[in-house]
Amino acid sequence: MKLTSQMAYKSAEDMIFGTALKPVTTKRGIVLGGGHVVPEVVPHPRPGSEKTMKTLLREYERANGDALERCVIVGHPTLQIENEHVFQMTHNPKWGGEIAAQTAKQMDEYLKKYGLKASYRSTPADLRKPDMHHMRESDYTKEVLESFEECTKYADVVSIESMGGKEIFDHAIIRNDIAGLLFGQAVLGGRDMEWMWTQIVEICKKNNCIPGGDTNCSEANTAMFMAGGFISKDVPHTLAALSRAICVSRTLVAYECGATGPTKDCAYEDPIIKAITGVPISTEGKTSACAHSDLCGNVIAAVCDLWSNEAVEYHDMFGATTTAVFAEILGYDAAAMNAAIDLGYQKEFQACLVNSDKYRGPHGFMLSPDNAWLIGKAVVDNNESLYARGKAAAIKCGELMLGDPKLRLTQFERESLMGYMKDMEKLPAKEEDFIDMCLKKYAKVKGFNPAAYGL
Amino acid sequence: MKILEDFSNIFTRYDLNIEVARQEARKVSKDAVLQKVADAVVAGETAECEAATKAALASKSPMEVINEGLIPGMNEVSRLWDEGVYFLPQVILASDAMNAGIALCEEKMGKAMDKKGKVVTHTAEGDIHDIGQVIVNALLNANGFEVINLGADVPVDKVVEACRLHNPVMVTGTALMTTTMTAFPKIAAQLKRLGLNIPFVCGGGAVSEEYVTSFDLGIWGKEANQAPGMAEDALAGDSWSVMRSKWNG
């Protein structure tokens, strides 16, 4: 696999919501990244509905159907629906396939009856927990790949939240260990993704499905959520930001293997991915408060092509069911961005989104388009290895955080960051030396199996 | 792009408002050798702690080193965390250092030190998101409890069997997904059927107070750092209903 050496975008100024350099067209004719933002709603089934395929099919029929119906009621022209598989849908690959088939049929009916253009993203669950299952040879691995086989027959787009390196990441994130993050996320995660995504892209080609992308949800999002808001004491926000920068090294691998976007919504690293690759990205911020809190509410929409809500459990609200309500909210957000585009005010609107959160915290800061582009540039300029580009991204991210006085850091956050920067200075220059060091350092981490990553 | 100079009308940085002044750890021992052991725990330096423990064991009994060096050092770390000076990674590193020291003391004693009580921990069947459980384990360990760690994706029967076998003071369940937390009431029902009225603390991700308090034995854990306090209550003999009224509602 050749590591990317050039930026798709020449500057951050060229990046805007709704337009990507490499747009993608879905089965019912939505051009993602083709000039306008598309809402993406993510329904999640209620507990108990996972008991049988029949009950789960019924749950998704209603949850997905309510979202489609609401778009017609309020006049949203497009909608993407994503179903992130619950365990049972991937563990029984036929279930995920049946749900994809059912949803595709619903979308065909809405297109025929109303002209609503909708697309469906199916996201099999990565059941492989690295410390419990062999990443390449377990029964769970087979189920995940079988699930892609089934879902790509009907879905417009498939994605995954791959788990490579999670065993090392979990050990490292609660120990302030930046080397462990680099090893788990960039070195192991990237290797696992290359193995997995080569196969996913082939399956997609066979079934005429769009290979969307991956997300470092299991690691960088874990760091971000542990860092939490302004009163959390679990993980420094500066460490979470470095973890985000590092993860670009591994998330990028999907696109290097042939994924085309739309990227996965919960990959907060996506603005950097868009700067490097030009693929359409799906992002989430304020509208994902139904699933989790973040400090990136508006800024994360600054260069989005799809605008998502992460996941909302299906149940009743005053205004209708949750999926109907969130389809409406997301669609109106997209309508505001699209109105700005058609009025020629898109850069002004983007400035409002950026100013809302760029300096709210380290994550919003590093994912602001200007800084996202600079971190992406560090990645492509250091493309000799997954490790080198992950480290370069983290160092650039750290330099940016320390170099902008408008980003105010607590004394603890600043001292922590300076410590990580010093730790990174001491790390080996070459990936092979770093791997040798890490194989010794993490030999006793529970369940770590280097062979599962081809090491 | 135009960027504001003043963001005070846009957001409030409460973290800067509540920033806690730097504090040094307090001295916990008048004995320089034992203080060095405690200092290594406070600093979270495992290698230093091992060296200091070995040095201390040359002149002190293992229980002296544990009770007057390692544990007071960890208590100091807990205090700094409670006061907002330390973050979680510093607590985990201190716990690693303390455990390394305790292992050396146990080696010299030829037996394991007595723990306060057992806690069975697990992550629900079908759920592999166990970092919350990992933190709970570390904090319980650091507070002197013996953790029976069943890991992630644990079937209901295995949790029940572990409770039957170990008779813990408390059992915990972690889940990220609402579709996996449905294992919790099944576990609670089986425990009740066996007459094991063990407080069952459930938390993580989408696990809600409303859900956990809908079945007997269930107590909702909002944050991982509540686990040691809850285990202390269970150890003191509080029933699940007493614990629920204290920690929930």
Image (spheres, helix red, strand yellow):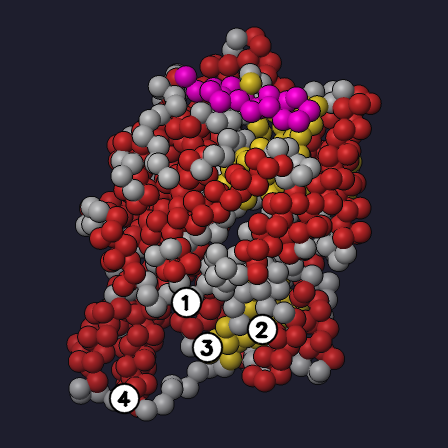
Alpha carbon separation for disc pair 1 and 3: 20 Å
Q: Amino acid at mark 2?
A: Val
Quarter of the figure that contains the N terminus of chain A: top left
Q: Name the residue at 56% across, 83% down.
A: B166
Question: x, y percentage for residue B70?
Answer: 30, 76
Q: Which residue is mark 3?
A: B145
Q: Magenta residues?
A: A14-33
- Pointers 1 and 3 in contact (C-beta within 8 Å): no
Q: Which residue is mark 2?
A: B171
Q: Are marks 1 and 4 on the same chain?
A: no
Question: x, y percentage for residue A441?
Answer: 28, 62
* Chain of the residue that carries numbered disc 3 in the rendered image: B
Alpha carbon separation for disc pair 4 and 3: 21 Å
Q: Which mark is residue A192?
A: none
Q: Amino acid at mark 4?
A: Lys
**Mark 1 nearby-residue class (10 Å; few <14, some 14–19, many ≥20):** few
Q: Are marks 4 and 3 on the same chain?
A: yes
Question: x, y percentage for residue A226?
Answer: 46, 50
Alpha carbon separation for disc pair 4 and 2: 31 Å
Furthest residue toward right = A113
Q: Amino acid at mark 1?
A: Lys
What kind of element bears circle 3?
A: loop
Q: Name the one closer to the observer, A388 or B51.
A: A388
Which is in the foreground here, disc 1 or disc 3? 1
Q: Which residue is mark 4?
A: B108
A272, above or below A293, in the image: above
Question: x, y percentage for residue A114?
Answer: 80, 21
